[in-house]
Amino acid sequence: MCSAGCTSAASGAASTHHARSWIDFQITSHFLFVLAIMLSVCREFYEVSFMTSTVLFFSVWYHKNREVFGVVSLVDSVCAKAFYIYALVQTSRSPSAPVFFLNAAFAIVTSACFIATHLDGDPRLYAWVHPFGLHVCPGIWTSFVVMTHEPIIFTTGLRTMAAA
């Protein structure tokens, strides 16, 4: 059952939910991920471009369908958690103390919002806290990482080929 009280085909009942509007905040709150992708492409931070694009695609798909449990929700969850772990690794590699503390603040906000919306099943809390804590904050965090860090995975390979 989704947060709007819909039933899914997976539960054996006919699906009664309607897709979320493209202007719903649960969808539009992903906008900062789009900016982070553009910034990461410009800075040749391709691992972030790939991970952010993947998270964006599956997250929008998941929320567009009103958080119906299924394959999309599982893939979205795995991608988002992998990206969060990547951001924590980048945090541990912060180039200075101020950058570390700002990364840590993003991590704390994101974690607190995740925990709050998963421990409390109130759909009104989820409707406001989730987009800010798991879309807006990580979107800003991603851009911050791109501006202050170096890639971990594609450290030289793609950058060297692009320069050649």
Image: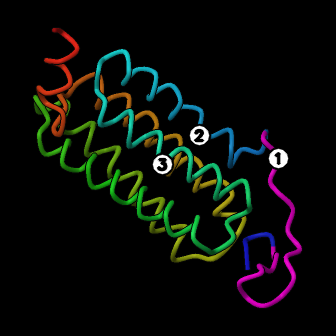
Q: Who is closer to the viewer here, 103 or 36?
A: 36
Residue 134, image x, y percentages: 50, 51
Q: Which residue is mark 3?
A: 55
In the image: residue 128, left or right of residue 105 = right
Q: Secondary structure at mark 2?
A: loop
The reply to whether dot 1 and dot 2 touch (C-beta < 8 Å) is: no
What residue is shown at x 25% (from left), y 46% (from top)? 104
Residue 95, image x, y percentages: 10, 29
Alpha carbons under labels 1 and 3: distance apart: 19 Å
Q: Secondary structure at mark 3?
A: helix
Name the kind of residue labelled 2 in the image.
His
Viewer-nearest of labels 1 and 3?
3
Q: Which residue is mark 2?
A: 30
In the image: residue 2, left or right of residue 39 = right
The reply to whether dot 2 and dot 3 touch (C-beta < 8 Å) is: no
Name the kind of residue labelled 1 in the image.
Ser
Viewport quadrant of the C terminus: top left
Colour theme: rainbow
Residue 29, image x, y percentages: 62, 40
Which image quadrant for residue 50?
top left
- Magenta-drawn segment: 5-22
Residue 35, image x, y percentages: 50, 25
Q: How many marks?
A: 3
Reply above or below: 79 against 46.
below
What residue is shown at x 46% (from left), y 41% (from top)? 137
Q: Who is closer to the viewer here, 85 or 154?
A: 154
User: Which secondary structure class fits the magenta region best?
Assistant: loop
* Crowd class of label 1 (few under 14; some 14 to 19; many from 20; radius 10 Å): some
What residue is shown at x 40% (from left), y 51% (from top)? 109
Q: Which residue is mark 1?
A: 21
* Crowd class of label 2 (few under 14; some 14 to 19; many from 20; radius 10 Å): many
Instruction: Report if residue 11 lies within the magenta region.
Output: yes
